[in-house]
Image: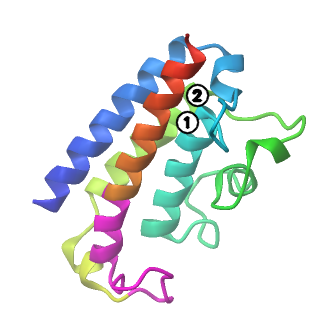
Amino acid sequence: MMRKTFELTSSMFLAVVNDLENLTDDQLTKIPEGFNNNILWHVGHVLVSNEFFMFGYPQTDTGLPQSYVSWFNTQTSPADWGEDKLPTISELYKALQTQLEKICNIDDTFLEQKLPFEFPVPGIVTYHDLYALMIYHEADHLGQIKAMKKMVTQ
């Protein structure tokens, strides 16, 4: 049941990200009034967070560039990006597609395992718990992206 929920949430997320390819770089990187981040950050943040949650990124090499941590991790900000060459929305979309396939292929026995670290949210003790949190997290950022898209395209 939870796998189906994740697949649906991720499919919606991918559809929105795919639609973002119509936006300009300025629209993707603009921080709308009342927000702390931009659309590109939210997309990259979901990618980085899911890799951390399920695959141990960045300590474990998952194929994502290490630079993504400094751009999209929790407590990062587009205000600190400087002149770095950021990934395009197309690159993030492709990475999210690959990630969805990897996550959908995770074995149930893996999800039952206890986390090898203490997660800062009470009640998150197994990968299954983290998987459930990941669904909420992705949906939350999807809402942020949709709100920002309205603001930057007006």
Identify which residue is drawn at 66% across, 42% down. Answer: 37
Find disc 1 in the rendering and name its residue: 92
Looking at the image, which residue is at 24% across and 70% down?
Answer: 107
Up-down: is 148 above or below 19?
below
Q: Look at label 1 and name its amino acid.
A: Leu
- Crowding at dot 1, Cα within 10 Å, few <14 / some 14-19 / many 20+, comes out as many
Give the quarter of the image for residue 60: bottom right
| Relative to 38, residue 15 above or below | above
* Residue in the image at 60% along x and 64% along y: 61
Tell me which segment is drawn in magenta: 115-135
**Circle 2 Cα neighbour tier, 10 Å, few/some/many (<14 / 14–19 / ≥20):** many
Q: Quadrant of the C terminus?
A: top right
Q: Are marks 2 and 1 in contact (CB under 8 Å)?
A: yes
Secondary structure of the residue carrying tag 1 is: helix
Mark 2 is on which residue type?
A: Ile
User: Toward the viewer: 56 or 49?
Assistant: 49
Where is residue 83 shown, x and y percent of the image? 90, 34
Q: Which residue is mark 2?
A: 89
